[in-house]
């Protein structure tokens, strides 16, 4: 396990002689029993990984919505069953033949759920992979494709959203649609810059540049002392977006907007990229679900296979930045690897085997997606603690640990616990949906003892920052020891 020195001493649960006079349990009780949390439901479990002693427990066997703490479950199961070097595969086929600089037939992209085709792993260039594919065709002398570009997403089910996801989240990137063919996180990035004067529409910079989406710019530039008012909508089952944000002068804003039909998005941008690279395509981009006759891969020619980065890098993205789509794709890939069918339910079925080995009573665990975006998921703090203990001693435990945000340093904890003793000593996964805030992981005390913890708050109505502060103060107290 990592051993990173902390910085300055800061007693935050209580001050001065109060902290010295009261045992740790009483200090935690005082934090969680504040009047502001009177209607909130807290679950806590803290245990030493060395001695096994439970330092504190509250409602530890009660069920909570975990939000993105569920990603701990998804990534742990994937590392346990697939291993850190496992990779997604995307296969490029043709059902035609090559002759005189032309591919006579269709170019078929058979997806395997790779989440990494896009900007994130390619120095911010969303079409880098497609450009490399174009170069591969050009090296084969191909400058003309007479057929269509077909996207085959049949490796996973066609259910585009997770069970129980909120309809009003659909336009936002964190609720991106799920497909075995996914490109650039299945979003477009829209950067808004103020117009030259108040009253003018904002200027838009869109990445990637594509005709796949239609943006209706109904934005407005406001005086500099005005408040930002964000508004984005997308017609259901379409790619027409309505941008109605009110943007103050002197301010920029960037939003990730989720597209509809990731498979068609994938092959459309591939089509546009090939055209830009000098490869003419006479056909059109097509979602394979449109076809009355599916490709017969026994008779097709495999041109090449594209591999994702290894799973160790995929889980790092999932946990560090809490990437929902990556988690959903990984859960379905786990189901397909184990049972031949890429659905959320087969992924959960496979994952339960890991949870059972971790000593979790899976009859009381409810898992319906891979990311935790659904409010239908239910776990207990004690279950989460058992999973954390299992992964701490797992052969791939270091990969799991390194995937977690570090307090005050990176990921979703970069701006929390930045100045206190917990900086660099807490490795933990955050979780948030409305009225749910969770934080679970590991902490190293000043004395070098490793603890696991799971902090879950449901049903609070105060600002989320108040829950954050309570969690942070509790962890800073743990760093100082009992």
Image (cartoon, rainbow, N blue to C red):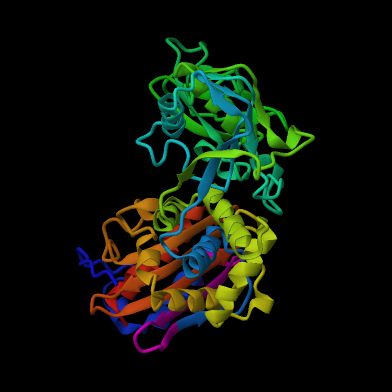
Q: How far from the left and from the top, in percent, is residue 156? A: 66, 50
| Residue 376 seen in this snapshot | no
Residue at 28 percent across and 75 percent down: it is: 445
| Outermost residue, front side | 99
**Could you tell me which quadrant the C terminus lies in?**
bottom left
| Outermost residue, right side | 292
Residue at 54 percent across and 80 percent down: it is: 357
Determine whether 123 is above or below 103 in the image: below
User: Along the line of sight, which residue is nearer the eye, 259 or 294?
Assistant: 294
Q: Residue 345 is drawn in which quadrant?
A: bottom right
| Residue 295 seen in this snapshot | yes
Residue at 41 percent across and 62 percent down: it is: 84
Q: How far from the left and from the top, in percent, is residue 111? A: 58, 43
**Could you tell me which quadrant the N terminus lies in?**
bottom left
Magenta stretch in the rendered image? 33-55
Residue at 51 percent across and 18 percent down: it is: 100
Q: How far from the left and from the top, in percent, is residue 244? A: 60, 23
Q: Magenta includes 39?
A: yes
Q: Is residue 292 left or right of residue 476?
A: right
Q: Residue 196 is drawn in which quadrant?
A: top left
User: Along the line of sight, which residue is nearer the eye, 407 or 305?
Assistant: 305
Q: Is residue 255 left or right of residue 139?
A: right
Q: How far from the left and from the top, in percent, is residue 117? A: 48, 39
User: Along the line of sight, which residue is nearer the eye, 461 or 266?
Assistant: 266
């Amino acid at each position: 396990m990592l051993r990173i020195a902390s910085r300055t001493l800061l007693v935050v649960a209580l001050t001065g002689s109060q902290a010295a006079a009261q045992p740790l349990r009483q200090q935690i009780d005082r934090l969680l029993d504040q009047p502001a949390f009177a209607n909130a439901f807290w679950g806590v479990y803290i245990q030493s990984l060395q001695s096994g002693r439970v330092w504190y427990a509250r409602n530890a066997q009660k069920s909570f919505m975990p939000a993105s703490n569920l990603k701990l479950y998804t990534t742990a199961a994937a590392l346990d069953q697939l291993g850190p070097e496992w990779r997604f595969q995307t296969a490029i086929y043709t059902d035609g033949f090559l002759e005189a600089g032309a591919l006579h037939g269709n170019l078929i992209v058979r997806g395997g759920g790779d989440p990494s085709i896009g900007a994130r792993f390619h120095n911010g260039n969303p079409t880098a992979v497609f450009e490399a594919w174009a170069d591969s065709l050009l090296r084969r002398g191909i400058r003309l494709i007479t057929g269509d570009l077909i996207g085959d997403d049949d490796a996973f089910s066609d259910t585009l959203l997770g069970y129980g996801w909120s309809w009003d989240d659909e336009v936002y990137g964190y609720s991106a649609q799920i497909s075995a063919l996914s490109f650039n996180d299945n979003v477009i990035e829209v950067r808004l810059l103020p117009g030259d004067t108040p009253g003018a529409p904002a200027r838009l910079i869109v990445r990637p540049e594509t005709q796949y989406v239609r943006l209706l710019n109904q934005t407005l530039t406001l005086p500099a002392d005005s408040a930002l008012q964000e508004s984005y909508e997308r017609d259901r089952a379409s790619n027409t977006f309505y941008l109605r944000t009110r943007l103050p002068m002197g301010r920029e804003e960037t939003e990730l907007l989720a597209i509809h039909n990731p498979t068609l998005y994938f092959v459309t941008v591939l089509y546009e990229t090939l055209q830009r690279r000098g490869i003419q395509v006479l056909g059109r981009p097509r979602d394979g679900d449109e076809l009355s006759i599916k490709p017969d891969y026994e008779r097709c020619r495999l041109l090449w296979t594209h591999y994702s980065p290894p799973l160790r890098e995929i889980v790092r993205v999932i946990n560090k930045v809490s990437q929902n789509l990556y988690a959903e794709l990984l859960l379905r890939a786990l189901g397909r690897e184990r049972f031949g069918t890429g659905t959320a339910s087969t992924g959960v079925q496979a994952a339960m085997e890991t949870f059972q080995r971790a000593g979790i009573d899976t009859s009381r665990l409810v898992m319906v997606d891979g990311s935790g975006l659904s409010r239908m998921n239910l776990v207990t703090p004690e279950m989460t603690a058992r999973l954390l203990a299992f992964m701490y001693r797992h052969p791939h435990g270091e990969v799991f640990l390194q995937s977690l945000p570090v307090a005050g340093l990176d990921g979703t904890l970069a701006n929390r616990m930045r100045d206190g003793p917990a900086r660099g000593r807490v490795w933990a996964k955050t979780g948030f949906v409305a009225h749910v805030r969770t934080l679970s992981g590991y902490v190293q005390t000043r004395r070098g003892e490793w603890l696991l913890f799971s902090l879950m708050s449901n049903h609070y109505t105060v600002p989320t920052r108040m829950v954050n502060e309570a969690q942070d103060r509790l962890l800073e107290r743990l760093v100082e020891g009992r």
